């Protein structure tokens, strides 16, 4: 299927064929609850190469080439001679699928730019045959930028779970190359198949401002979308500190749903010790906070006035002035 929008492919059994599903240059697809098993790829003519990824075309069971804003949810991709799914595109959700016993798990990017895709709450079971095992260390390859892989179960990564919360203590490192995060990884892999046992929020990460910047005027604060293991609704609150976190001031009046906020820094005094904090709140009450890793500066020409004197200092100053006046009076009296 190519150049399609808002198509639904659901409830199909695709078994014992030469190939699987192929989508090209499409958007807003919904591929749900399909059973895909026992299929073979008709051609394996291209050898696996870490430089030239054209061999991917020959091995995809679900091929998503140039696909965006789509959902691949609840499918069973089992015992196929090929890669569970291959994706190039942006802003896609791949969730609650069972990918088991295939030649390989999944592949993102390589021959097309891929960014801001979310792959979460899937089960990847025994997808690494000899052909792939000789070249890769995991069940997935991720290339691109800002692709989020989290809350998945990987059959080759089930321990340690020292606090028995249902999450493996060490991230599952994936093959491939991408920015943010780098290297690609599942930061909260499940020790057992889905659903997750413990409610957890991962992220967000601040995108801007970061580093030792000097800010002035209006800027846009940006952060990545947080991920909730139980898919609760999430909202955000922003806080600002001009003294390295000793005191915080909330910037937004109402909870935020988007991940961008326009902030007028001229409403604040100049400081070289500024931090931002993003607090993520789930609809069940669980929250998680992210704080700037490096302080930044605000420079709008507004100098912070000195703090007012405390009552104790005021009394001491008054006593000092009275004592000085009395001493001066006595000195002048003696000279008369």
Image: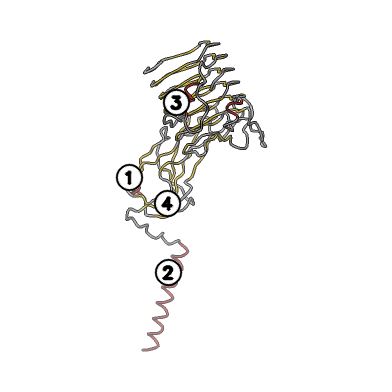
Mark 1 or mark 3, which has the lower sequence index?
3
Residue 134 relative to residue 52: left or right: right
Q: CA distance from mark 2 to mark 3?
A: 69 Å
Instruction: Kindly indicate whether the residue at mark 3 contacts the one at mark 4 (C-beta within 8 angstroms).
Output: no
Query: What x and y, as percent, mark residue 42?
Result: 51, 15
Do residues under tags 1 and 3 come within 8 Å of each other at their CB atoms? no
> Viewer-nearest of labels 2 and 4?
4
Image vertical order of residue 288 relative to residue 311, above or below: above
* Residue name at image x 35 percent, y 53 percent: 299
Kindly check if marks 1 and 2 are in contact, taking CB atoms under 8 A apart as contact.
no
The residue that disc 3 covers is 92
Q: Residues within 10 Å of mark 2 (few under 14, many from 20)?
A: few
Q: Nearer the viewer, residue 177 or 115?
A: 177
Q: Nearer the viewer, mark 1 or mark 2?
A: 1
Q: Marks 4/3: CA distance?
A: 33 Å
Task: List x then y, in percent, for residue 188.
Answer: 57, 34
Q: Earlier in the sequence, mark 1 or mark 2?
A: 1
N-terminal label among 4 and 3: 3
**Does dot 4 land on a helix, a strand or a loop?**
loop
For label 4, the residue is 212
What residue does disc 2 label?
318
Toward the viewer: 159 or 271? Answer: 159
- Earlier residue among tags 4 and 1: 4
Q: Which mark is residue 218?
A: 1
Left or right: 30 in relation to 133: left
Neighbour tally class for label 4: few under 14, some 14-19, many 20 plus, Cα within 10 Å: some
- Image location of residue 24, percent across then percent down: 40, 20
The residues bearing labels 4 and 1 have C-alpha atoms spaced at a distance of 17 Å
- Mark nearest the camera among 4 and 3 is 3
């Amino acid at each position: 299927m190519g150049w399609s929008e808002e198509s639904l492919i659901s409830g199909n059994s695709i078994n014992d064929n030469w190939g699987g599903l192929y989508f090209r240059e499409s958007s807003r697809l919904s591929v749900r609850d399909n059973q895909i098993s026992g299929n073979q790829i008709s051609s394996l003519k291209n050898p696996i190469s870490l430089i030239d990824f054209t061999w991917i075309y020959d091995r995809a069971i679900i091929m998503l080439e140039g696909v965006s804003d789509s959902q691949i949810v609840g499918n069973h991709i089992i015992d196929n001679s090929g890669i569970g799914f291959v994706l190039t595109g942006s802003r896609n959700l791949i969730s609650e699928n069972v990918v088991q016993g295939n030649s390989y798990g999944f592949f993102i990017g390589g021959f097309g730019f891929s960014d801001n895709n979310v792959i979460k709450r899937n089960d990847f079971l025994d997808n690494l045959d000899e052909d792939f095992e000789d070249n890769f260390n995991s069940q997935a390859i991720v290339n691109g930028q800002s692709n989020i892989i989290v809350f998945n179960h990987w059959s080759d990564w089930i321990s340690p779970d020292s606090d028995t919360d249902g999450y493996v203590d060490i991230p599952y490192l994936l093959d491939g190359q991408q920015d943010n995060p780098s290297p690609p990884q599942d930061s909260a892999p499940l020790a057992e198949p889905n659903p997750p046992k413990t409610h957890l929020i991962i992220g967000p990460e601040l995108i801007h401002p970061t580093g030792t910047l000097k800010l002035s005027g209006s800027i846009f604060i940006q952060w990545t979308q947080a991920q909730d293991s139980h898919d609760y609704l999430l909202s955000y609150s922003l806080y600002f500190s001009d003294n390295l976190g000793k005191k915080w001031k909330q910037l937004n009046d109402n909870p935020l749903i988007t991940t961008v906020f326009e902030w007028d820094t001229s409403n604040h005094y100049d400081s070289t010790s500024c931090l931002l904090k993003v607090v993520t709140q789930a609809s069940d009450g669980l929250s998680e906070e992210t704080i700037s890793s490096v302080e930044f500066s605000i420079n709008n020409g507004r100098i912070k006035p000195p703090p007012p004197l405390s009552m104790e200092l005021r009394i001491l100053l008054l006593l000092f002035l009275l004592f000085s006046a009395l001493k001066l009076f006595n000195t002048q009296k003696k000279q008369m």
